[in-house]
Image (cartoon, rainbow, N blue to C red):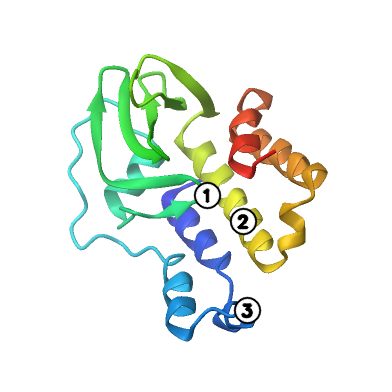
Amino acid sequence: MSPAVFVHELAETAPSVADLLALELSADAAARWVAAYHVVPRACPLILEFPIQDEALALVRAYEVGGLEIGMVTFMDCPKSLGNGVQFAVVEMDLMVLTEAGEVVVVDWESPTHLMWRCAADGAHFLQALSLASRFFTLCLLDPGISNEDQYATGVARSVGAAAGGTEYESFYQMLFGV
């Protein structure tokens, strides 16, 4: 998935202000929540001098994603080079990295050589999977009963893992969905 399609699909997953007001959020909080789904282009794209070129890095380069949070994944404003790739996000405190081989993984923040989760075959697959995850989180917000249905969440994690590139990525989305 390209960054432009990801940004468009993310905006489409936003709940409406009316839905959030029905959940008893204040008008101001509801407006901020909906605005968080709308990522805008950077006034001046970042100049990234990494040997790795990928759709996830293209997203960070072209759009204001610093602080964009989808589940426990929070994008950084500016990626940084690591010995094993480029960090472009965090999962809670751990580092989300695009490896030199092009795979998206999460490594331990204290020991960056320790692989915790494989997340996607590449950045394009990761954006596709994260778009689907965002839709799931919005459904859970609007119908809290869904988040209590482990069987449903497990099925969604399986589908999202497939979109990420295969079954080897499913465990990351199981963790993200709490199953």
Mark found first going from the N terminus, 1 or 3:
3
- Residue displayed at 77% across by 60% down: 145
Relative height, residue 173 to residue 17 (above, below):
above
Position of 143 with respect to 110 (left or right) is: right
Horizontal and vertical percent position of residue 69:
44, 53
Please name the residue that numbered disc 1 is placed on.
71
- Assign the C terminus to one quadrant of the image: top right
| Mark 2 residue crowding within 10 angstroms, few (<14) / some (14–19) / many (20+) | many
Toward the viewer: 104 or 113?
113
Tell me which amino acid carries mark 1: Gly
Q: How far apart are marks 2 and 3 (CA)?
A: 14 Å
Tag 2–tag 3 contact (CB < 8 Å): no
How many labels, in total?
3
Horizontal and vertical percent position of residue 119:
53, 31
Tag 2–tag 1 contact (CB < 8 Å): yes
Tell me which amino acid carries mark 2: Phe
Local secondary structure at mark 2: helix
Tag 1–tag 3 contact (CB < 8 Å): no
Please name the residue that numbered disc 3 is placed on.
19
Horizontal and vertical percent position of residue 175:
61, 36
Toward the viewer: 140 or 83?
140
Q: Which mark is residue 137?
A: 2
Mark found first going from the N terminus, 2 or 1:
1
Relative height, residue 18 to residue 179 (above, below):
below
- Residue displayed at 41% across by 24% down: 107
Quadrant housing residue 65: bottom left
Position of 150 with respect to 73 (left or right) is: right
Relative height, residue 3 to residue 176 (above, below):
below
| Mark 3 residue crowding within 10 angstroms, few (<14) / some (14–19) / many (20+) | few
